[in-house]
Amino acid sequence: MDEGPRYAIYFVPAAGSDLYRFGCSVLRYDCYTGEQVAPAHELAGDADSWRSLTEEPRRYGFHATLKAPFHLSCERTERQLVDAMQSFAAAGHAVPAIAPVVEMLEGFAAVVPQRPDPLVNTLAAHCTTAFDRFRAPMSPRERARRLATPLSRDQTENLERWGYPHVFAHFRFHMTLTGRLAVEAHEARVATLRRCFERLCGYRPIAIDRVALLRQDTPTARFRVLSHAQLRAPL
């Protein structure tokens, strides 16, 4: 049923990192604290426009999806989910690193890897399967909403089995920065975001070295970090 909170497993950069500072200053929201954040100065001169352009991703916080949002199964508890996330992080995982770029991705701007990394895809696949026992079945309303967007046969099968179409071969690591942009605005908006990213972060590799469990209390609420942990490397 589409009731109660939703949960998600995300990569959220460490709260004190340059990368997280960049993402928060673009989205103007800190999902660790739930507080508003002042815009980066590259965006401040057109603050109202940028606020509108980032309204949708602001609800989710600055993140990359590893297990898409889901309602909790009636057979599981939030405490069990928190414990499972902590155990997952401690179980031993190869820690991938990406070379980041700011690009357009299907009509919105995002931080993405210069090239796909199999280790990132493996981590996301493990999250998809490991936490699926906590996911309540899709409601008819949620299923209809997902199917309103054209999906391939494989994506439809993923939706039916895993509750989300963009998993496994259809997964692409990305950290969303805007909602959909008008085509004529792509170049200028991306250029501004790149200037901001270079100033705050540079283009150093990003280690995908942690996982976070986030909670959304109502459909219009913003996601907040409930628990987070650094990935432990294999022994």
Image (cartoon, helix red, strand yellow):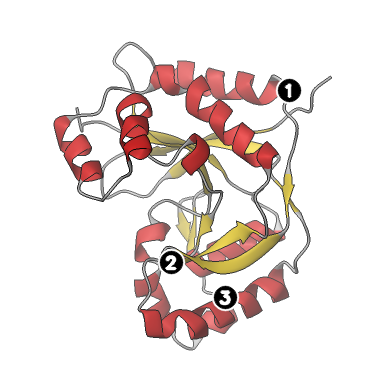
Q: Kindly indicate whether the residue at mark 1 contacts the one at mark 3 (C-beta within 8 angstroms).
A: no
Q: Which mark is residue 108?
A: 2
The percent position of residue 132, horizontal first and vertical second, equals: 43, 22
Q: What kind of residue is marked 1? A: Gly
Of the two numbered discs 2 and 1 in the rendering, the one whose residue sits closer to the viewer:
2
Q: Residue furthest top?
A: 75
Q: Residue furthest front?
A: 153
For label 1, the SS is: loop
Gap in angstroms between the C-alphas marked 2 and 3? 12 Å
- Which residue is tagged 1? 92
The percent position of residue 68, horizontal first and vertical second, equals: 42, 38
Q: What kind of residue is marked 2? A: Phe
Q: Which mark is residue 193?
A: 3
Res 71 visible: yes
Q: Residue furthest right?
A: 235
Viewer-nearest residue: 4 or 37 = 4
